[in-house]
Amino acid sequence: DGGITQSPKYLFRKEGQNVTLSCEQNLNHDAMYWYRQDPGQGLRLIYYSQIVNDFQKGDIAEGYSVSREKKESFPLTVTSAQKNPTAFYLCASSIVPGVRSDTQYFGPGTRLTVL
Amino acid sequence: AQKITQTQPGMFVQEKEAVTLDCTYDTSDPSYGLFWYKQPSSGEMIFLIYQGSYDQQNATEGRYSLNFQKARKSANLVISASQLGDSAMYFCAMRGEMNRDDKIIFGKGTRLHILP
């Protein structure tokens, strides 16, 4: 079954710690994305990558970092510099980035809570 | 700047009735795409339907249809014969051809409650 997996489903972090959220896809999609969702809000783009070894900042990249060493994987690190990291994080992928009809498909999400 | 507006924060609808979820958008792009996603309580965003700005006909996918009125800049989602499983958050989203960020702009969503 093709799809996008995110792990862990729930993550707790102490203040001052870095944490890494995993995102893997076996859809052979070129592009991958990380979004953040706060309660009662829509999604905001953190980072995206249209090709291996390349990625771009989205609207709210400060305090986050990513890597794209493999087509299938796009991990997100939430650093201690992110002042308010408690949120729901969604990873997505798409086939043909930059085309208006290109649909993004999402993983199940990771809920991060800072204690 | 591109913007999506969903004016209904919450809706209650009787099971088996049809539902219309409102979405208006603003863009200066001549070519753009409109999307609807469903987010159940589990959190995953599920793609429902897509409408291109130059598509001649309104998009349909099973019980979902998109009432696209380009002049009014509206892209309302219509769910026919609603079911209890339709209870969820629904997000309208847009991507423009000239979107340099390659991102989809999301509205704030509408929470739909289907009543038995």
Image (cartoon, coloured by chain):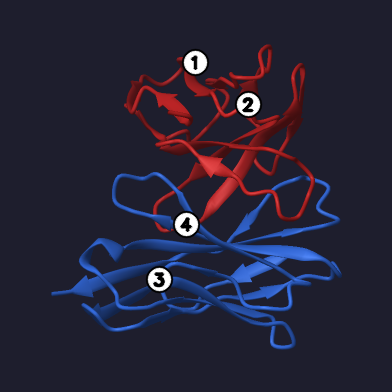
Q: Nearer the viewer, mark 3 or mark 4?
A: 3
> Could you tell me how far apart the alpha carbons at marks 1 and 4 are, in whole angstroms?
25 Å
Disc 3 residue crowd, few under 14, some 14–19, many 20+, Cα 10 Å? few
Decide which of A4, B91 is in the foreground and name it: A4
Decide which of A113, B71 is in the foreground and name it: B71
Asked if the residues shown at circle 4 and circle 2 are in contact, with their CB atoms under 8 angstroms apart, the answer is: no
> Could you tell me how far apart the alpha carbons at marks 3 and 4 are, in whole angstroms?
26 Å
Q: Position of residue B66 (x, y in %)?
A: 55, 75
Q: Is residue B45 left or right of residue B76?
A: left
Indicate the secondary structure of the residue bearing disc 4. loop
Disc 4 residue crowd, few under 14, some 14–19, many 20+, Cα 10 Å? few
Residue type of the residue flagged with mark 4: Gln
Residue at the far left: name it: B116
Q: Which residue is mark 4?
A: A41
Disc 1 residue crowd, few under 14, some 14–19, many 20+, Cα 10 Å? some
Q: Are marks 2 and 3 on the same chain?
A: no
Q: Which chain is blue?
A: B
Q: Which chain is red?
A: A
Vertical side of A94 occupied by B76: above or below: below
Residue type of the residue flagged with mark 2: Asn
> Could you tell me how far apart the alpha carbons at marks 1 and 3 are, in whole angstroms?
44 Å
Indicate the secondary structure of the residue bearing disc 2. loop
Disc 2 residue crowd, few under 14, some 14–19, many 20+, Cα 10 Å? few
Q: Are marks 1 and 3 on the same chain?
A: no
Q: Which residue is mark 2?
A: A28
Which label number is shown at residue B63?
A: 3
Vertical side of B68 occupied by A34: above or below: above
Q: Which residue is mark 1?
A: A18
